[in-house]
Image (tube, rainbow, N blue to C red):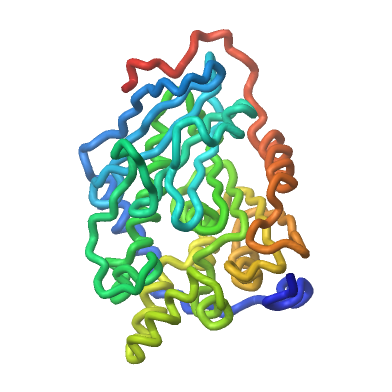
Amino acid sequence: MPLTDLSLAQCLALRPDLDEPADLDRFWSRTLDQARATVARPSFTPVDTGLTQVTTYDVTVPGFDGEPVRGWLHLPTGVREPLGCIVEFLGYGRGRGLAHEQLLWASAGYAHFIMDTRGQGWSTAGGDTADTASLGGAVPGFLTRGVDSPQSHYYRRVFTDAVRCVDAVREHPAVDLDRIVVTGISQGGGIALAVAGLVPGLAGVMPDVPFLCDFRRAARISATSPYTEIAEYLRLHRDRTDTVFSTLSYVDAALLASRATAPALFSIAMMDDICPPSTCFAAYHRYAGAKDIRVYEFNGHEGGGGHHRREQLRWIRELLAPPHPTGAPPLHDPQLA
């Protein structure tokens, strides 16, 4: 697979001048204050997965506008002290799946929360998260849903959901609220960056080949969906270019990354034709906290795969070194449900 974007040397030197809305911080402060004003509380319902070493909860979180957002919380069985927690956001078009499918982080001894992305999941038992807002003349996909205004844009709802999921895990007694890390691949990586810029006090951030960064450049150079949704919309609506990119600037993860201060481990793939590496580097360079990066020069959007999971496991082990055992009884009480 050939390079589809700038070289590594060019990306390392890149410092794009992104258009930042003057009211970006006020916009998100108002949005999150409104979401947190709900009286609804998260619920944690035990699930029988047939697994003996991992305990799983079916979680419902009041997200944007108080709407229910689903998730799984996995805990190593027999937890006796608060654990470091990995909060994971998913790639484009993916939902939380089945309860037993994603066990890496719980197997490594951490709490693991997986957020179901509104409108993108599926379930045979009604366990997905719906997006109730009108499409507003969007082309197929999610990038142009509500794109006429930042107030109505799809990712305003998704980012709010993600923040509220972090709020929710902080309420669970098996989670150490000072050792929470957010992560995700592609769309999930972009959401993780946004959350890192919106939620103080995180222990770390692990964005992999992040989507949702430097929208204007991505729309101009990417020939592969999902970024092509923007070009397709503007091909039909020739007079809305300024409006579209103004709206998208409010949910640009590269802009929100400049507010993030938690330690970060990025991954970027130089032959990525879905999330062009120059757009990922835009977020990396603007990231305000301590940061490290793994670059996969000959990989596409699959990124580092298992090799990068190994890097993350090492990084997380050092970052979230557990306190000394307390000998206390197990913390994840099923009566929490």
Left or right of 107 on screen, residue 199: left
Question: Which residue is the extreme one toward the front?
Answer: 124
Instruction: Identify which residue is drawn at 40% across, 27% down.
Output: 57
Residue 283 in view of the camera: yes
Q: Quadrant of the N terminus?
A: bottom right
The spot of residue 94 in percent (x, y) is 46, 51
Between 98 and 278, which is closer to the camera in this rendering? 98
Left or right: 267, with 70 as reference point: right
Residue 89 coordinates in the image, percent (x, y): 48, 48
- The x and y percentages for residue 172 are 41, 27
Q: Above or below — where is 202 with respect to 328?
A: below
Quadrant position of the C terminus in the picture: top left
Q: Position of residue 153 (x, y in %)?
A: 32, 66
**At 33% across and 91% down in the image, what residue appears?**
239
Residue 178 seen anywhere in this rendered image of the structure: no
Q: Residue at x 34, y 74 (%)?
A: 139
Write down the quadrant of residue 297 in the picture: bottom right
- Viewer-side residue, 264 vs 299: 299
Q: Which residue is pictured at 54% across the width and 83% down the height?
A: 220
